[in-house]
Amino acid sequence: MTEIGIIGAGTWGTALALLLHNNGHKVTLWSAFEEDAANLRDTRQHPHLPGITLPGDLVFTASMEEAAEGKTLLVLSVPSIYVRSTARRMAPYVTRGQLIVNVAKGIEESTLFTLSQVIEEELAGARVAVLSGPSHAEEVSRGIPTTCVAGAGREEEARKVQSIFMSPVFRVYTSPDVLGIELGGSLKNVIALAAGIADGLGYGDNTKAALITRGIHEICRLGMKMGGAFETFSGLSGMGDLIVTCASVHSRNRRAGILIGQGYSVKEAMDEVNMVVEGVHSARAAWKLAEKYQVEMPIVEQVNQVLFAGKSPKEAVTELMMRDRTSETGTLSWKESSLF
């Protein structure tokens, strides 16, 4: 049995708390708000995970000291915009060499850091791993078979995360490509907004397939330029996570995109979803990275134009469709025809 502190009692943190508890570990779940911690403690229900009863020996707290101090493993599961401030709150209770698993997905706009880089800056001496993949909390909490990938700089740390999280309903692979995993997990949210916008405009499966396919092309192009591996972007934390986020009824990013496509403002859409929409927070950072690394990302560019420059979604789609003619890959060449 491992003593684990989960920092963040949103749907994903709560679903992982349930998973790890069912794996036989002793789990403490931290909320930033005493009222929310008390409600979870008293009702054993999470408001956004209907029908799920949380075990009686799962500990809920608003005390960072209680959640973090002395734990073998810490799981950081807060929205990306709160990762830095939460890591600072954790700092007094984190020991040198302690393993922290980040499960949030995003890029810090002000620094263009991945979240593991943010954590490493705030928690010097800690070891940071990541866990990512196509894994909606609503399904993980119900025990629906799910696969993810654990990334770490050292193989033994990735294998440790694998052994702690893996179960008959939650399969975990390992990878050394932490950067690629994090880029795939954050950039796919921006593409999912575009897929949702297309749904909101009433477009069909052809459009969705095009956005997913060209979206992974953009993610891969930037990710590899930054040092990520092609295999990562074609795997669970790349194509896998992109598919589920673009298509699932559980996807907040897709839902927000649908509303924007239907005419809602960005603020109205986020208020309606009533949970953090990570793609909105990652969109500017994604475009800044594209400019920094001189990578063409037309879908990301148009999402930014719709979100922050007042462009209509229909106009953005038309601009994507009418871009200059080009080949699909840019790497294949024509062979001379032979006459015989």
Image: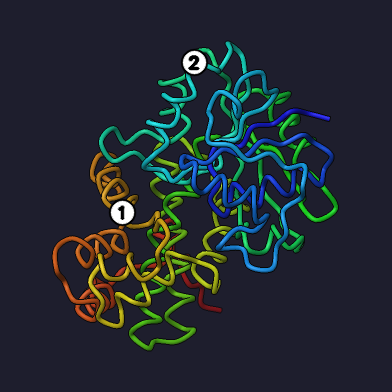
> Which type of secondary structure does the marked residue at label 2 adopt?
helix
Q: What's under tag 2, amino acid-wise?
A: Pro
Q: Is residue 174 visible?
A: yes
Query: Is residue 56 toward the left or the right of residue 125 in the image?
Result: right
> Which type of secondary structure does the marked residue at label 1 adopt?
helix
Residue 14 spot, x, y in % from top left: 62, 49
Q: Dividing the image into 4 quarters, which one contains the N terminus?
A: top right
Vertical placement of residue 327 versus 114, above or below: below
Query: Is residue 110 toward the left or the right of residue 62 in the image?
Result: left
Vertical placement of residue 221 versus 90, above or below: below
Residue 128 spot, x, y in % from top left: 56, 26
How many residues crowd around disc 1 within 10 Å: few (fewer than 14), some, or many (20 or more)?
many
Residue 21 spot, x, y in % from top left: 77, 43
Residue that mark 1 sits on: 283
Residue 113 occupies quadrant: top left
Residue that mark 2 sits on: 92
Vertical placement of residue 313 versus 286, above or below: below
Residue 62 spot, x, y in % from top left: 53, 36
**Front in this rendered view, residue 330 or 145:** 145
The answer to which of marks 2 and 1 sits earlier in the sequence is 2
Residue 197 occupies quadrant: bottom left
Q: Dividing the image into 4 quarters, which one contains the C terminus?
A: bottom right
**Front in this rendered view, residue 228 or 52:** 52
Residue at 68%, 54% in the rendered image: 44
Total number of numbered discs in the rendering: 2
Q: What's under tag 1, amino acid-wise?
A: Ala
Residue at 74%, 28% in the rendered image: 3
How many residues crowd around disc 2 within 10 Å: few (fewer than 14), some, or many (20 or more)?
few
Q: Is residue 182 visible?
A: no
Query: Is residue 271 toward the left or the right of residue 220 in the image?
Result: left
**Front in this rendered view, residue 303 or 320:** 303
